[in-house]
Amino acid sequence: MRRAHTVEQVRSAEADLMARLPEGTLMQRAAGGLAVALGNFMGGVYGRRVVLLVGSGDNGGDALYAGEKLARRGAQVTAVLLSDKAHPAGVEALRLAGGRIGDADELAHADVAVDGIVGIGGRPGLKPEALAAVRRAEQHGVPIVAVDVPSGVDVDTGETPAEHVRAALTVTFGTHKVCHLIDPAASACGPVHLVDIGLDLPDPAATALQGPDIRALYPVPRGESDKYSRGVLGLLAGSAQYPGAAVIATSGALAGPVGMVRYVGPDAVAAEVRAEHPEIVAGEGRVQAWAIGSGLGDELDLPRIRALLDAEEPVVLDADGLKALDESGDHDGILATPHAGELGRLLGVERSAIEAERLKYARVAAERFDVTFLLKGSTTVVAAPDGQVRVNTNGTPWLATAGSGDVLAGLCGALLAAGLNPLDAGSVGAYLHAAAARLASAYGPVTAMRIAGALPEATRRILDRRD
Ligand SMILES: NC(=O)C1=CN([C@@H]2O[C@H](COP(=O)(O)OP(=O)(O)OC[C@H]3O[C@@H](n4cnc5c(N)ncnc54)[C@H](O)[C@@H]3O)[C@@H](O)[C@H]2O)[C@@H](O)CC1
Ligand SMILES: Nc1ncnc2c1ncn2[C@@H]1O[C@H](COP(=O)(O)OP(=O)(O)O)[C@@H](O)[C@H]1O
Ligand SMILES: [K+]
């Protein structure tokens, strides 16, 4: 599991550890890890040209000491000091190792620019001189490696209200920060490399499941399982207007861990679903969970949905079904799966505001409606009413295709029916959905039905430890 901590948590853990270690130890650990990562990134050290962009704090100190280590191994290192307070001992160490102090013109010939402008002490945005240097690197096509975080992003929220660095790689220390997991900032990090500096950390502010977590959580049938004990999902979806949504959501559900799917909807739609999936059973019956909402269109029956929300069985609530949510209900066991536009309508804010502050609004919704919210988008945020947050970062923009949300709703419903709680169902569902999309897309266009079609193989690879 990838764990992300807040700046305050990191500072407190650093203070505890620093009190027990000789001065400067942590910075040397950070700089050592950064120098190794830079060497790997450049594919070598000797003769490489490295430009350090150095701000006023310890983030610049990390960059300077990493530069010192690279200079000692034969790299040509130049530091661009963006503040007259740049870490004095780091500047001296770099000089003694043969590094130079220069200006942003050096970027014209650099192999890499190291962003040591600000780290976890930074406010969002870049000052003019730093921004000019970053632009210069971009103009010359010089890749930027960010120290700890891409300077200019909001570290604790993942928001990017102002100018910021766009890194080809981020090398972070001790633990991930929230901005590494949550968009839009996460997209500015590139791959994130974590250097262990020995911090002892509290419970994280957000987590991201990885393959081993999925293996541990996935409801694999046992020897004595039968189709009912594996879980039966009721699917209330589709309409004359949108029959395809029912077919697609059923595809997602059948590719999940349930023993059976009951489809509930107009006869004509049921016939289409059955034509594609002869395995389904049409009509109501006992179920362990519901997936409600995909493509309901004219069939939207809010009183019926509210009755199902009040019943005992857990529910995935998607698309038009979200209109049935209200703040007063007793909503135990519900996973709401809006995209930014739908969440904006529920909360009465603009879609663009949701996209800019994804973590905040997922949390606000979970608290206000007292249900687990899965906010879809480039990174998917799953927020539970108790404050736990999981993030899915392994998607692909090719997932942004009509109907892929219906696949996710069916899959999450299947995971709920098989016994996972809403937080686990949402986060495991988002992970597998993204893994299937990557597999089916293989870096090219993909349709929702092909994503559903790839789900069993994507799941198999993870359960079989091949991914
Ligand atoms: N504290 C520690 O023990 C360790 C810290 N490390 C490094 O230290 C960093 C944190 O260092 P600091 O606390 O010195 O903070 P930063 O290096 O993030 O910088 C803070 C300084 O930048 C200024 N500043 C804030 N926002 C700015 C902006 N948008 N533009 C320009 N200047 C701005 C502030 O006035 C302050 O002087 C971490 O990110 C990490 O890189 C690592 O060496 C590991 C150990
Ligand atoms: N840029 C992106 N990168 C990764 N995943 C994305 C991106 N945009 C959308 N997605 C994912 O694609 C799916 C789209 O779902 P949704 O918006 O409900 O579409 P639809 O209603 O057409 O099914 C969601 O799982 C969402 O997280
Ligand atoms: K930085």
Image: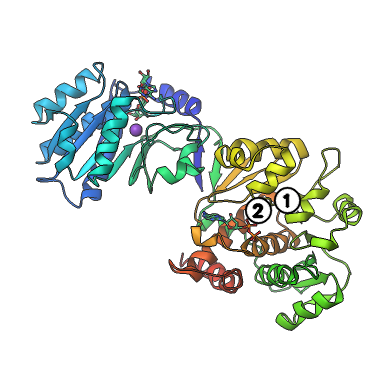
* Residue most extreme to the top: 85
92 on left or right of 54:
left
Drawn side of residue 281 relative to residue 207, left or right? right
Taking 236 as reference, is 260 above or below it?
A: below
Label 2 or label 1, whichever comes before in sequence order: 1
The location of residue 284, given as percent across then percent down, is 89, 69
Please report the residue visible at 82 percent of the width from the left and 45 percent of the height from the top: 331
Image coordinates for residue 128, horizontal then vertical, percent: 32, 25
Residue located at (84% from left, 76% from top): 282
Kindly tell me whether residue 387 is visible in this rendering: no
Instruction: Report whether 466 appears left or right of 225.
Output: left
Quadrant in which residue 235 is drawn: bottom right
Q: Is residue 98 above or below residue 409?
A: above
Whether residue 276 is visible = yes
Q: Amino acid at mark 1?
A: Leu
Q: Is mark 1 within 8 Å of ligand 2?
A: no
Q: Which mark is residue 335?
A: 1
Q: Is residue 168 left or right of residue 389?
A: left
The image shows residue 264 at horizontal and vertical percentages of 84, 69
The residue that disc 2 covers is: 426
Identity, as a three-letter code, of the amino acid under mark 2? Gly
Q: Tell me whether circle 2 and circle 1 mark residues in contact (CB < 8 Å).
A: yes
Marking on residue 10: none
